[in-house]
Image: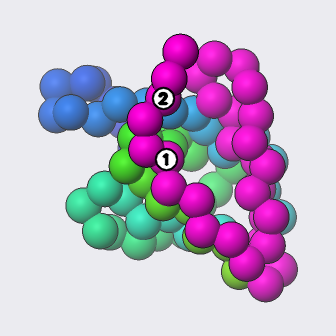
Amino acid sequence: MMVDDNTHGIHPMGTVVDLHGVVAIIGSKGVRRILKLGDMLNEGDTVVTGDEGDMTIGLTDGTTIKVGHDSEVTLDTFLS
């Protein structure tokens, strides 16, 4: 899980609240890793699902985003 202290320009957008199959994240610095339930997602992250992966993101404002299989979603800017 990435720790956010907001001192290095990391802006939390939400967390992984549901996860099935393999789902990866490409961080804003280009590092790819496999997501786990509860992982934090930050501004600039890209979520990539495979043919059997899907997930739900719980945003910091309480809304959710469902990401289906074979998808790629980049978390750009959070508008309130």
Q: In the drawing, what numbered circle is on residue 78?
A: 2
Residue 77 located within the stretch drawn in magenta: yes
Residue placed most toward the observer, 69 or 6: 69
- The answer to whether 43 appears left or right of 58 in the picture is left
- Quarter of the image for residue 69 reads bottom right
- As helix, strand or loop, the secondary structure at mark 1 comes to loop
Q: Position of residue 74 (x, y in %)?
A: 50, 55
Which contiguous range is marked in magenta? 51-80
Q: Is residue 8 above or below residue 67?
A: above
Q: Are marks 2 and 1 in contact (CB under 8 Å)?
A: yes
Q: Residue at x 16, y 34 (%)?
A: 8
Residue 16 located within the stretch drawn in magenta: no
Q: Residue at x 43, y 53 (%)?
A: 45
- Quarter of the image for residue 30 reads bottom left
List the single residue furthest toward the bottom: 51
Residue topped by disc 1: 75
Q: Position of residue 77 (x, y in %)?
A: 43, 35
Q: In the drawing, what numbered circle is on residue 39?
A: none
Give the CA separation, mark 2 to mark 1: 8 Å
Q: Position of residue 75 (x, y in %)?
A: 49, 47
Kind of residue at badge 2: Phe
List the single residue furthest toward the left: 8
- As helix, strand or loop, the secondary structure at mark 2 comes to loop
Residue 8 at least partly seen = yes
Residue placed most toward the observer, 7 or 44: 44
Q: Is residue 51 above or below residue 26?
A: below
- The answer to whether 16 appears left or right of 19 in the picture is left
- Quarter of the image for residue 58 reads top right
Counting other residues with Cα less than 10 Å from the Cα at mark 1, is it few (<14), some (14-19), or many (20 or more)? some
Residue 21 at least partly seen = no
Q: How many marks?
A: 2
Counting other residues with Cα less than 10 Å from the Cα at mark 2, is it few (<14), some (14-19), or many (20 or more)? few
